[in-house]
Amino acid sequence: MKTFSATPADIDKKWIVIDAEGVVLGRLASIVAMRLRGKHKPSFTPHMDMGDNVIIVNADKIQLTGKKRDENFYWHTGHPGGIKSRTKAQILEGAHPERVVYQAVKRMLPGNRLSRQVLTNLRIYASAEHPHDAQNPEVLDVKSKNSKNTRVSK
């Protein structure tokens, strides 16, 4: 029995839309990262981009458990003393709340060229509208997969 290795002709990409309203951030990010890599497919090949195109809507209504809303995202400008930080709550209430979801998914992928290529298949929108209706995306209901995937806001 020979090991199957997918070629570009074997890859079948689908479009998936996920509603993030009320879903816990880490659980959503792990499901999206798996879909982006293509690990849910039986023909998964580690060195190929064979994952699906994922659209996430309502990213501003994502839920965080515990005290994670008050934890910081850090980055450095490259200049001396250039460390900067924002809490996740500040980012979610700001102009680009989808960045919290993007960073969570990005950090669940391996840090290599392939994962940077895979991230181009991810589209995140803060509202419920998206411009990808022409692709006929399938709806993936993350809330019904596990009762722990949702959280009632306090």
Image (tube, rainbow, N blue to C red):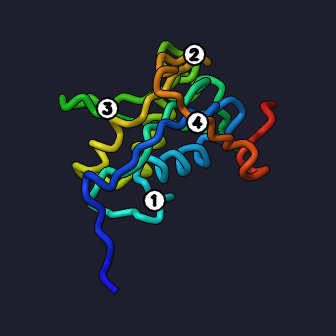
For the residue marked with disc 2, what is the amino acid? Answer: Glu
* Residue at figure coordinates x 52%, y 20% from the top left: 133
For the residue marked with disc 1, what is the amino acid? Answer: Lys
C-alpha span from label 4 to label 2: 15 Å
Q: Secondary structure at mark 2?
A: loop
Label 2 CA crowd tier, 10 Å (few <14, some 14–19, many 20+): few
Label 3 CA crowd tier, 10 Å (few <14, some 14–19, many 20+): few
Q: Sequence-wise, which precedes: disc 3 or disc 1? A: 1
* Residue at figure coordinates x 44%, y 29% from the top left: 123
Residue at image mark 2:
129
C-alpha span from label 2 to label 1: 28 Å
* Residue at figure coordinates x 61%, y 48% from the top left: 27
Up-down relation of residue 96 to residue 11 (above or below): above
Label 1 CA crowd tier, 10 Å (few <14, some 14–19, many 20+): some
Q: In the image, is 84 to the left or to the right of 72?
A: left
Mark 2 or 3: in front is: 2
Q: Sequence-wise, which precedes: disc 3 or disc 4? A: 3
Mark 4 or 2: in front is: 4
C-alpha span from label 2 to label 3: 35 Å
Residue at image mark 4:
138
Q: In the image, is 71 to the left or to the right of 80?
A: right
Where residue 154 sits: x, y (%)?
81, 31
Q: Sequence-wise, which precedes: disc 2 or disc 1? A: 1
Residue at image mark 1:
39
Residue at image mark 3:
83
